[in-house]
Amino acid sequence: ESYRRIKETDPSIRAFITLNEEQAREQAAELDRQLAAGAERGLLFGLPAGIKDNIVTEGLLTTCASRFLSNYNPIYDATVVKKLKSAQSVTVGKLNMDEFAMGGSNENSGFFPTRNPWNTDYVPGGSSGGSAASVAAGQVYFALGSDTGGSIRQPAAYCGIVGLKPTYGLVSRFGLVAFASSLDQIGPLTKNVEDAAYVLQAIAGYDPMDSTSANVDIPDYISALTGDVKGMRIGVPKEYMGQGIDPKVKEAILAALKVFEGLGATWEEVSLPHTEYAVATYYLLASSEASSNLARFDGVRYGVRADNPDNLLDLYRKSRSQGFGPEVKRRIMLGTYALSSGYYDAYYLKAQKVRTLIKRDFDNVFANYDVIIGPTAPTTAFRIGEQIGDPLTMYLNDICTIPVSLAGVPAISVPCGMADGLPIGLQIIGKPFDETTVLRTAHAFE
Ligand code: GLN
C-alpha cells in the first residue's frame, strides 16, 4: 500500500531519494511469518516508516542529500534504526532533505527539491522536508527527522502534521550524520500526537554509543495522553507574537489559546528577552560545529573522490569543491572564520555565553509555567524559489524554533488551522525531559 501511494504521489512531491522496496517486502513477510508462529507484535508492528537520509541504514544508501555522499552505503544501522527494527516497523526508504540538514526549504538538496503536498508550488519546509511531505501525502505511516534549529518542527508546521523535537540527549544520535553536535536531535514526524508518543516510546533511551546520551528513566508516553490540562499554566512569549509574525498565524495561535482556556488551562504573556540574539547565535555556533564535523569529508574516507588530483591537498580541494553545494560551503567558511584564532573569543566564545542567557530565559519562565506556547514559524510555507537568493530571510524563518534548540528543551508542532490553503503550526515547548507534558498538552488540543 505504501509503495502504491508512493508510485501515485511521488512523481509530483519527490519526497524519496532511495526506495527500499525489495528488502521492505522481505521484512514484512518475515514479520508475518513470526506472527503466524505465535510471536508477539512489536510496538510499531508492520508500520511503514520513512527515514531522513542523514540517518545511516545498513546496506541502504545514505546520502544526506549531498552529491558528496551519493554513493555512500553504510555498513551499520543508527541506534534509532535498530530500535525501529526491534519495534517491528518496516523501512520504506530514505527521505530527501536540505544537504547535510542545512536549510529550511529542501531547496538545498543536492539532487532535487521536495514539494509541499498541499500545494506543489510551495516548499515543504526543511530540513526534514521529505519526511514531512511523505507523512502528509500518506506515503508512510511515520517518518524520522532530525532537528538542529527547527528542522522537524518547521516542516511539520508547513505540511500540516505533527513533529516532535525531544530534549537534547533523550534520543541517541549514534548513526546520525552530525551537523551541529550540540544541537542535533532525532525525532518523529507523524499524522497525530498519539503516533508521535508511540514512535518516541520506541526510539528514546540511553545509548552508550552516544556520549551525549542522557541516562534517564523513560516514562510511559502513551498513557500520558489523558486529555487533561485543567489548571495548566501556559506562558506565551511576546517575542514570538510581535513583529514579523503573519497576522493570520497570530490569529490562529490566539484561537488555539481560547481552546486551552475552554479546557481549563490559563495563559499569560511572558518574555524570553534574549530571543532577538538567538538567530545570530545559532548560525555562529551551528556553522562552527558544522565546519569541524564536515572536515571528515576529504574524498578519501567517505563518498565521492575527485578524479586526477595533482597531489593530496588538491584531492581534498577538488573533492570538497565538487561534492558540497553552495549553502554547505557558505557555512563551512563562516564556521572556519569564527573558529580561527584571533576571532574565536570575539565570536564563538561570545555566542556560547549568549546561548547560556537564552537557556536562562527558558528556566525563568518555567519556574512559573508548565509549558510555553506560540507559533512554530512566523508564516506559512513560501513559494519554491521565493527566498533561495536571500539566505538571511531564509534564516529568519527559524526565529521561533532556534531558541528552543539552543536551550535543549523539548517542543512539538501540531496543526492549528489554515491560511490561504496552507497549514499553520502551533508550537508547545516543555521543560527538559518533560515530553509527557508536551505530548499531553498537544493531544488535548488536537
Ligand atoms: N533551518 C535551520 C538551518 O538551516 C535549521 C536546520 C536544522 O534544524 N537542521 O540551520
Image: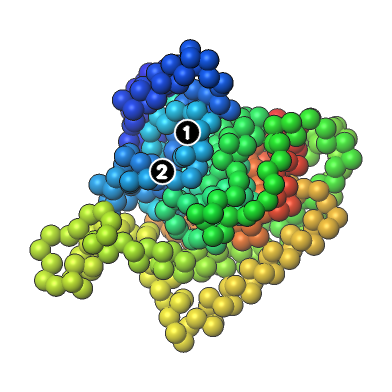
Q: CA distance from mark 1 to mark 2?
A: 10 Å
Residue drawn at the location 57% of the way across and 59% of the way down: 212
362 displayed left or right of 233: left
Whether residue 144 appears in this view of the structure is no
Whether residue 296 appears in this view of the structure is yes
Quadrant location of the C terminus? top right
* Model colouring: rainbow
Q: Label 2 amino acid? A: Asp
Between discs 1 and 2, the one toward the N terminus: 2
Residue drawn at the location 83% of the way across and 36% of the way down: 229
State the residue lying farthest toward the top.
36
Q: Position of residue 403 (x, y in %)?
A: 63, 59
Q: Position of residue 98 (x, y in %)?
A: 41, 49
The front one of 209 and 135 is 209
User: Dot 1, how many residues are within 10 Å of its Cα: few (below 14), some (14-19), or many (20+)?
Assistant: some
The front one of 411 and 85 is 85
Check contact, mark 1 vs mark 2: CB within 8 A. yes
Residue drawn at the location 71% of the way across and 53% of the way down: 432
427 displayed left or right of 329: right
Disc ID at residue 85: 1
User: Dot 2, how many residues are within 10 Å of its Cα: few (below 14), some (14-19), or many (20+)?
Assistant: some
Q: What is the secondary structure assignment of the residue under circle 1?
A: helix
Mark 2 lies on residue: 77
In the displayed structure, 113 sits above or below 275; it is: above
Q: Position of residue 41 (x, y in %)?
A: 56, 22
Quadrant location of the N terminus? top left
Q: How many marks?
A: 2
State the residue lying farthest toward the bottom.
342
Q: Label 1 amino acid? A: Lys
Task: Please identify the quarter of the rendering in which residue 56 is found.
Answer: top left
Residue drawn at the location 74% of the way across and 31% of the way down: 223
